[in-house]
């Protein structure tokens, strides 16, 4: 449910009608004091708060809401028709607001923002529940310490990539909003939605702890075009690491039958590792080839620290980390193990070619369903 707070009833009626047209459940409050009473009584997913009100103004109401442990995570959007200079906008964010909109507002943009913030709130709430479930599970699994560590490591690693992407796309949407770039806002919010859907699927997997501990993640196979898939994965990394040059060579106009989200995890892991382990180079290369008509290979090459030959065979083992680099680079040693399991499930193979001090190429090959035009 959404709570709209405004001291003018005509504003409440107009905004309530807009939101209910888009199937939102809406409640209203005519003062800050009434809003605080309702916030403590009912579970709201978002609050739209007018800045100028008699008694408690919007900033004071927001500070009070953020101060309650029960309500501190509820996203707040400020609306103002008068206080639109930088000082008041900054005060809105400092008071706990997630956004500051100036009247008159574009209903389409407002609805897009509301949907995004509600999804983020729901994901945060879900992750909090998962965290509590994990704490309870850890207490139960003290007799199986190694399995507990494995579970937490996989959970942390798999959730990190979509969360980072969500943050990056929201920052870009905010910049587009400042420039009144509506097309840009919609594009970045759509990309945020895509990443949140991926995160939601990962959360669903994590809730089934028995499958995670045993390594039996759920897969959803379907046909998809390879080129848009690989370009999308590269774009995610470009947005997350704007200072890096991701250079793609080769093209494969083919269709794949597989779990697109899981395979994207592999590509993103390869790319983030390439960036991580080549701190003195800004270039990372994605090389796409078709070694045979029924196979496609993706190689990610960097100019980084490289890996000693005697260590390369163990890189895809569970928890393995190269001792020489473990003190310089953080990591749990789970990423490549997860990648290996995903590629195996797709009937493919994987490997690494590396020369110490010169760089590495991590690759995988998977079957092709058919060629496309």
Image (spheres, grey):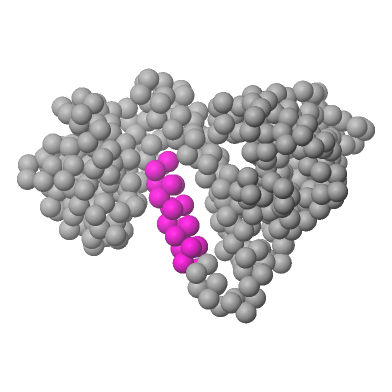
Q: Does residue 133 appear to the left or right of 100 in the view shown?
A: right
Which image quarter: residue 281? Answer: top right
Q: Can residue 39 be seen in this view?
A: yes
Q: In this view, does 130 lie above or below 285?
A: below
224 in the magenta segment: no
Give residue 364's position: percent from left, percent from top: 81, 41
- Magenta region, residue range: 116-133
Which residue is pictured at 24% across the width and 54% down the height? 67
Which residue is pictured at 17% across the width and 29% down the height? 83
Q: Which of 176 and 28 is in front in this view?
A: 176
Question: Which quadrant holds the C terminus?
Answer: top right
Which residue is pictured at 80% across the width and 37% down the height? 356
Q: Nearer the viewer, residue 65 or 141?
A: 141
Q: In this view, does 266 lie above or below 299?
A: below
The overriding secondary structure of the stretch rendered in magenta is: helix
Give residue 70's position: percent from left, percent from top: 30, 60
Q: Which of 21 and 292 is in front in this view?
A: 292
Give residue 249's position: percent from left, percent from top: 77, 23
Q: Does residue 266 appear to the left or right of 1 in the view shown?
A: right
């Amino acid at each position: 449910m959404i709570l709209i707070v405004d001291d003018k009833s005509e504003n409440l009626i107009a905004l309530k009608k807009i939101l209910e047209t888009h199937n939102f459940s809406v409640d209203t409050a005519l003062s800050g004091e009434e809003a605080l009473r309702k916030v403590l009584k009912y579970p709201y997913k978002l609050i739209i708060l007018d800045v100028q009100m008699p008694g408690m103004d919007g900033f004071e109401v927001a500070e009070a809401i953020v101060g309650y442990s029960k309500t501190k995570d509820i996203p707040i959007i400020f609306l103002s028709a008068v206080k639109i200079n930088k000082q008041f906008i900054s005060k809105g964010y400092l008071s706990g607001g997630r956004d500051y909109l100036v009247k008159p507002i574009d209903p389409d943009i407002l609805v897009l923002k509301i949907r995004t913030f509600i999804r983020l709130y729901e994901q945060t709430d879900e992750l909090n529940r998962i965290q509590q479930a994990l704490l309870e599970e850890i207490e139960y699994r003290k007799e199986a310490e190694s399995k507990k560590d494995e579970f937490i490591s996989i959970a942390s690693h798999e959730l990190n990539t979509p969360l980072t992407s969500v943050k990056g796309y929201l920052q870009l949407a905010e910049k587009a909003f400042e420039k009144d770039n509506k097309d840009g806002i919609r594009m970045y919010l759509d990309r945020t939605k895509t990443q949140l859907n991926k995160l939601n699927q990962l959360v669903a997997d994590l809730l089934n702890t028995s499958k995670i501990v045993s390594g039996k993640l759920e897969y959803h196979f379907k046909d998809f075009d390879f080129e848009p898939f690989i370009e999308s994965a590269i774009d995610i990394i470009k947005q997350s690491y704007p200072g890096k040059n991701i250079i793609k060579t080769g093209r494969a106009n083919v269709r794949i039958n597989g779990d697109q989200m899981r395979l994207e995890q592999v590509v993103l892991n390869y790319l983030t590792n390439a960036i991580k382990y080549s701190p003195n180079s800004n270039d990372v290369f994605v090389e796409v080839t078709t070694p045979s008509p029924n196979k496609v290979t993706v190689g990610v090459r960097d100019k980084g620290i490289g890996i000693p030959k005697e260590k390369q065979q163990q890189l895809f083992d569970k928890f393995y980390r190269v001792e020489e680099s473990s003190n310089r680079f953080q990591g749990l040693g789970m990423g490549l193990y997860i990648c290996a399991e995903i590629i195996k499930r797709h009937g493919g193979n994987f490997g690494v070619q590396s020369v110490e001090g010169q760089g590495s190429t991590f690759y995988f090959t998977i079957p092709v369903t058919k060629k496309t035009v």
